[in-house]
Image (cartoon, rainbow, N blue to C red):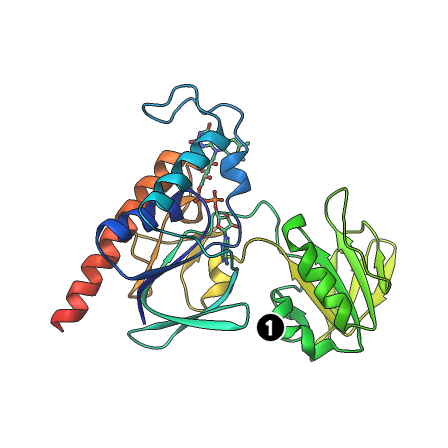
Amino acid sequence: MYDSIVIGGGPAAVSAAINLKILNKNFLWLGAASSKKAASAELVRNYPGLPEVTGRQLMWAFENHAGRLGAVRRAELATAVYDLGGRFAVAAGTETYEGKTVILCTGVSAQKPIEGEEEFLGRGVSYCATCDGFLYKGKKIAVLLFDKAFEHEAEYLCTLAEKAYVMPMYRGCGVKAENAEITVRMPAAIRGGLKAEKLVFADGELAVDGIFVLRASVSPAVLLRGLQTEGGHVVADRQCRTNVAGVFAAGDCTGRPYQYAKAVGEGNIAAHSAAEYLSGQGRA
Ligand SMILES: Cc1cc2nc3c(=O)[nH]c(=O)nc-3n(C[C@H](O)[C@H](O)[C@H](O)COP(=O)(O)OP(=O)(O)OC[C@H]3O[C@@H](n4cnc5c(N)ncnc54)[C@H](O)[C@@H]3O)c2cc1C
């Protein structure tokens, strides 16, 4: 069992990982992808000591620092966190990892969930090709692709499904499969009864057996049922503690301002708070 599981691939997660490493904690770092948001700033003017750095350079320096300490991000998307009372199980791909604490550094997604997406999650809607793909062997599926990094997962799904409607939300989709129909379309809603049955578009509907939503983030509220959120942000105190004992949150996911310095500062605090929590557990 890990002392901590860090979820995220941006500055907050890097900072939490660096500090857990320095604190000699045994931790797992799950980050679906290196933060595209953090790398996208053309010029960062407010990061102390680096007056002319780009987002890409800053992110490279952060990750290089973590790597030099031996903190390695595993490129996996966490799809669920289960509170087992004193420990947590985190699902990612086909694996489940256990940790005594969890540090959420998921950022905030610019993409709002599709209407019905969260309602039907686990009932015909899946975030994980490798976990749920086999359920749709020989069936008709829709794959909503929000990130090029997941094209191999879409191709894997095509090897199982009878027919796959692949909908990239970006230009230049490279998915290749004979049974894939690639169309750039954004559904307005997912509808169904006991399970998801169809995608609804402005100009019609598409009936499918299953819907895969492949993006590089899962929001904290979907990850962990019972986590207190407000206005789309995790409610956390100045020690980065959430309402769930043992779960900490850092970075953009805790609210504005959305800034690198705040993210790395909170990543630091969350790591120290997790260490303090662990030593308290040891004394109990
Ligand atoms: C164009 C632009 C310019 C900017 N300029 C500045 C600036 O000049 N100065 C400044 O201070 N800030 C700037 N920012 C803001 C800054 O980039 C963010 O505040 C910072 O990246 C927040 O870091 P974070 O780690 O909290 O979240 P993010 O950087 O958003 O990282 C979140 C990461 O978590 C991963 N993730 C999410 N869910 C999961 C999951 N379930 N499992 C695994 N991984 C997951 C995502 O893939 C992502 O990698 C800018 C942002 C943009 C978009």
Q: Which residue is mark 1?
A: 131
Q: Quadrant of the C terminus?
A: bottom left
Give the vertical position of 160 relative to 243 (above or below).
below
> In the displayed structure, does residue 188 sit left or right of residue 213?
right
User: Which amino acid type is shown beneath numbered disc 1?
Assistant: Cys
Provide residue 194's location: percent of width, then percent of height. 69, 80
**Residue at screen point 76% across, 48% down:** 173
Give the vertical position of 30 relative to 96 (above or below).
above
Q: Nearer the viewer, residue 83 or 279?
A: 279
Q: Nearer the viewer, residue 259 or 10?
A: 10
Quadrant of residue 151 within the rendered picture: bottom right
Q: Can residue 115 be seen here?
A: no
State the residue lying farthest toward the top.
52
**Residue at screen point 45% across, 52% down:** 8
Provide residue 21's location: percent of width, then percent of height. 27, 52
Element class at badge 1: helix
Quadrant of residue 101 within the rendered picture: bottom left
> In the displayed structure, does residue 111 sit left or right of residue 32?
right
